[in-house]
Amino acid sequence: MQHIISNVSILYPRLNQPYRFDNGERRSVSCNWDADGAAYDTSFIMDKEEAVNLRRICMEAYKNAVAMDTKNNWPKEPKRLPAKSEKSDDGSTQFIGKCTLKAKYGSDKTRPPSQVDAKRNKLPEDFRLTTGSKANIAVTVVPYNTGEENYGVSLRIRAIQVLELAPEKESNDPFEVQDGYTTDDPFASKPAESLEEVLSDEIPF
């Protein structure tokens, strides 16, 4: 079942290349398409109307799968859906969804999700979508039941139409300027490195 989720706010997009979750680093890292767990994905915030409509479509897709199950292996209700509601910092309710596309199915490499601008002009495959951008997302609604309490509905991302591109946020260290040790050169003006840049430097010992 195909569906377009309209005018969402993008969260944590990983679409410019495949990524996988690294247990050692406790975060998603870029990887080759054939690595275990490699995928493209993004989360998104939608308004209540879109959320209600998406839930209706997901439930319909799941019920269709149950109806086609001749061996009664499918539970009557899905355990997992691809969206949830949660409270934001200001106390309002946010409706957050997530869609994913594996970088391979079996041994076959997957075509990455296409990305186009508001005028439907194709964007480069390595285009870096940013958190806070506004977009429409085309997905395939996929009911699943792999047993062992793992059954529900997922969203397989097919394409994104970028309506507004948010500027990429720069990482800032959490500190304020203090009196004390400094590496400032008194004879030259040099901007300080961010904490992220300092921590990423290689230490030779």
Image (cartoon, grey):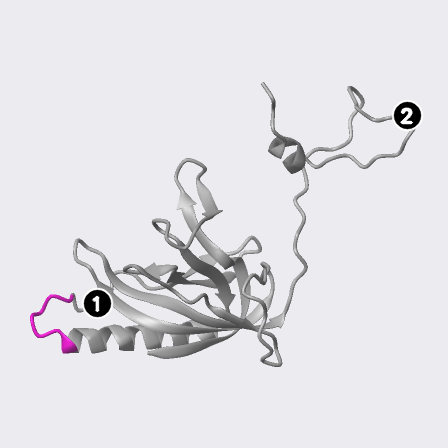
Residue 23 belongs to the span the image colors magenta: no
Residue furthest to the right: 187
Q: Which mark is residue 186?
A: 2
Q: Alpha carbon of mark 1 to alpha carbon of mark 2: how far?
A: 69 Å
Which of the two residues, 63 or 17, is positioned nearer the viewer here? 17
Q: Residue 30: percent from the left, percent from the top?
A: 48, 49
Amino acid type, residue under disc 1 in the picture:
Glu
The answer to whether one can see residue 94 in this image is no
The numbered mark, 1 or 2, whose residue comes first in the sequence reads 1
Which structural element holds mark 1? loop
Residue extent of the magenta highlight: 68-74
Q: Quadrant of the N terminus?
A: bottom left
Which of the two residues, 110 or 83, is positioned nearer the viewer here? 110
Q: Residue 174: percent from the left, percent from the top?
A: 67, 36
Amino acid type, residue under disc 2 in the picture:
Pro
Which of the two residues, 80 or 35, is positioned nearer the viewer here? 35
